[in-house]
Image (cartoon, helix red, strand yellow):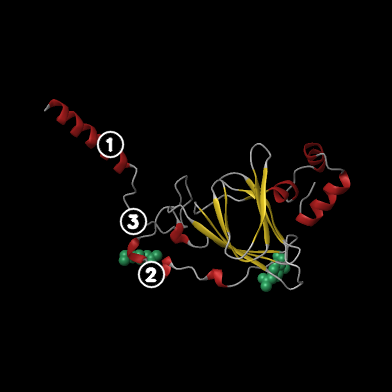
Amino acid sequence: MVILRVVFLFSLLVLLTVSSAISVVEFCVADFNYPVGPAGYPCKNPANLTVDDFIFSGLGVPGNNSNPFKLGLTYAIDKTFPALNGLGISMLRQDIAVGGVVPIHSHRVSELILVIDGPIVSGFIDGNNVAYYKTLNKGDIMIFPQGLLHFQVNMGDKPEFFALAFVSLNSANPGFQTTTCSLFANDLPSNVIEKITLLDATQVHKMKELFGGSN
Ligand SMILES: *[C@@H]1O[C@H](CO)[C@@H](O)[C@H](O)[C@H]1NC(C)=O
Ligand SMILES: *[C@@H]1O[C@H](CO)[C@@H](O)[C@H](O)[C@H]1NC(C)=O
């Protein structure tokens, strides 16, 4: 009897511990009138929501690719699709023109890519500097583990070929950090960049011009 009671109490404890980690709301559409915190934005009043709050129609068209990477990106993340707030999921559309790339970048969470139109060379680099990369074709998916640097390159041979892929990430706000922009799109002094990258002054100047950096 005593053992049974102990088992019962233990089960109750486990149940309480588990259920305390479960959200008390079913959804929390972001209210941008308040600042974001570690768990996301505060919720809009559910009385004000309609089905349209749960639909995002922006992924049907290519993003603007007038940039050095020839990359069109469309984001379905918390900022553009507030219903994702708190749900740990997001999605992007990537249109890569010929000669274009998804530049090397990282984020806090993992990413799955689904190739709709390839070929795309796709890869990541792990903490031991091992590069895992391969040419992906239509229908292939690949996982990029959280936090690791990764990239994609359009390998099409026709001038008008656009590579197309959709990615999903396990955060509504993945925290994108693109290495090139981190180095060359701000006011970090050129002489510091030369030291920390071993690039020469001409190369750093060229990249600062291209990405709008100063100093
Ligand atoms: C949200 O709904 C409440 C209650 O129905 C209403 O009083 C309020 O004005 C609404 N707020 C907005 C921003 O529509
Ligand atoms: C595309 O982006 C470029 C560079 O930011 C901008 O000048 C241009 O107006 C944009 N085109 C459209 C159609 O938004």
Q: Residues within 10 Å of mark 3 (few under 14, many from 20)?
A: few
Q: Are marks 1 and 2 in contact (CB under 8 Å)?
A: no
Q: Position of residue 17 (x, y in %)?
A: 30, 38
Is label 2 in a helix, a strand or a loop? Answer: helix
x, y percent for residue 184: 75, 49
Above or below: residue 139 compared with residue 180: below
Is 84 in front, or is 186? 84
Is 69 left or right of 62, judged from the image as shown?
A: right
* Residue 132 visible in the snapshot: yes
Q: Which residue is mark 2?
A: 51
The residue wearing badge 3 is: 26
- Mark 1, other Cα within 10 Å: few <14 / some 14–19 / many ≥20: few
Circle 1 residue: 14
Q: How many marks?
A: 3
Amino acid on which the number 1 mark rests in the picture = Val
Q: Look at label 2 and name its amino acid.
A: Val
Lower sequence index among marks 1 and 3: 1
| Labels 2 and 3: the sequence-earlier one | 3
Give the image location of residue 123, x and y in percent.
66, 51
Mark 1 or mark 2, earlier in chain: 1
- Whether the residues at callouts 2 and 3 have beta carbons within 8 Å, the answer is no
Ligand 2 quadrant assignment: bottom right
- Residue 78 visible? The answer is no
**Residue at image coords 35%, 60%:** 45
